[in-house]
């Protein structure tokens, strides 16, 4: 990490320390501060309204947000909606955004030059709070502004908005031809989740280490017991592995590396959550304790954008296709799935 990126990460961390509230389902104050810092459209090209940063820098910022349990849709805005719009040649508006890939029941039609979008989009992150939704549908990106769709509110295990969006002959503000694919969309979403999860695992591990050092049982701190030491060491190892995998995937930006990172992060999340709650006991599940803000997000993000079984299957299929002669180059050089 170079000095510029390190300074940016420290700035974002300081902003989150002042304004993040893990108990909120949506934090507009934090979002406004992040916009002021200039990170909400970090990887979007400058000519399209963003900062022109690379994926590695974006992943480091997302790791901070995951560590702070920040209730803002930066991954959806920067990695998905911003990418779809900019890649299609459109300027990206300010404000929180979200994105979705249309299913078979969503229809984009053009009649006398006017476009309409009809159908249902399930579990769209942050839809109720977004300024608009970028929908990848039938070789196009359709941007539907807030107010152009109806929302049935839902949430994931951590309380983050996951809304059902109903489009009734919605009139998109823009419809642009796009070469983006559903697979690329899913991979970018998985990269964002892997980076967020790495940060949340850092918090869960730090809280467990602190609690084990403070809680006294049978006349000595929990951290003095060998079994607890093993738990803490395993958590630290899993967290480091997930962090390095996410960083490598962001640096390479290839499907193989992203699949490996999401599979690794989702697998590690199960271990870290289990051990963190074993160390804390019942107190870690209470509303007042900070651990649940990390672990509920990890349990939710573990399945979003593909869980470890899905990405593991994709990696296995790619390895089989590569054959004995191509397996080592695939592992060392990566590439597309």
Image (cartoon, rainbow, N blue to C red):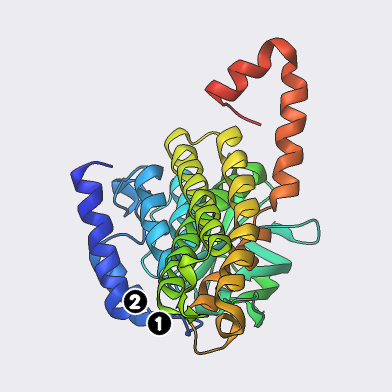
Residue picked out by circle 2: 30
- Vertical comparison of 285 with 323: above or below: below
Q: Residues within 10 Å of mark 1 (few under 14, many from 20)?
A: some
Res 176 visible: no
Look at the image and tell me in which quarter the C terminus lies.
top right
Q: Residue furthest front?
A: 219
Q: Nearer the viewer, residue 71 or 173?
A: 71
| Image coordinates for residue 299, horizontal then vertical, percent | 64, 66
Question: Secondary structure under badge 1?
Answer: loop
| Image coordinates for residue 81, horizontal then vertical, percent | 50, 57
Instruction: Give the residue drawn at x 20%, y 54%.
Output: 7
Q: Nearer the viewer, mark 1 or mark 2?
A: 1
| Image coordinates for residue 174, horizontal then vertical, percent | 51, 59
- Vertical comparison of 255 with 129: above or below: above
Instruction: Give the residue drawn at x 63%, y 58%.
Output: 271
Instruction: Give the residue drawn at x 61%, y 84%.
Output: 282
Q: Nearer the viewer, residue 214 or 119?
A: 214
Q: Are marks 1 and 2 in contact (CB under 8 Å)?
A: yes
Instruction: Give the residue drawn at x 58%, y 51%.
Output: 265
Res 151 visible: yes
For residue 310, side relative to residue 129 (left or right): right
Residue picked out by circle 1: 21
């Amino acid at each position: 990490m170079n000095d510029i990126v390190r300074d940016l990460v420290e700035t974002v961390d300081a902003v989150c320390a002042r304004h993040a509230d893990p108990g909120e389902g949506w934090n507009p104050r934090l979002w406004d501060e992040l916009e002021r810092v200039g990170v909400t459209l970090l990887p979007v090209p400058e000519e399209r309204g963003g900062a022109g940063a690379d994926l590695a820098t974006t992943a480091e910022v997302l790791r901070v947000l995951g560590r702070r349990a920040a209730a803002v849709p930066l991954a959806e805005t920067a990695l998905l909606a911003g990418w779809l719009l900019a890649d299609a040649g459109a300027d990206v508006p300010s404000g929180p955004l979200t994105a979705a890939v249309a299913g078979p029941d969503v229809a984009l039609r053009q009649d006398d030059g006017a476009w309409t979008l009809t159908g249902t989009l399930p579990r769209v992150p942050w839809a109720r709070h977004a300024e608009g939704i970028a929908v990848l549908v039938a070789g196009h990106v359709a941007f539907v502004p807030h107010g152009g769709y109806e929302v049935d509110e839902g949430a994931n295990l951590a309380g983050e908005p996951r809304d059902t969006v109903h489009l009734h002959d919605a009139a998109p503000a823009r419809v642009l031809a796009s070469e983006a694919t559903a697979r690329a969309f899913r991979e970018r979403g998985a990269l964002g989740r892997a980076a967020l999860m790495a940060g949340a695992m850092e918090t869960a591990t730090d809280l467990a280490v602190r609690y084990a050092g403070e809680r006294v049982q049978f006349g000595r701190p929990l951290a003095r017991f060998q079994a607890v030491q093993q738990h803490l060491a395993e958590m630290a190892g899993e967290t480091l592995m997930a962090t390095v995998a996410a960083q490598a995937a962001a640096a390479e930006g290839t499907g193989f590396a992203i699949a490996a990172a999401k599979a690794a992060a989702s697998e590690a999340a199960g271990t870290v959550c289990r051990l963190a709650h074993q160390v804390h006991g019942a107190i870690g599940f209470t509303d007042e304790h900070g651990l649940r803000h990390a672990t509920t997000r990890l349990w939710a993000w573990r399945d979003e954008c593909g869980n470890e079984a899905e990405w593991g299957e994709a990696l296995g299929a790619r390895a089989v296709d590569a054959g004995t002669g191509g397996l080592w180059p695939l592992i060392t050089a990566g590439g597309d799935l």
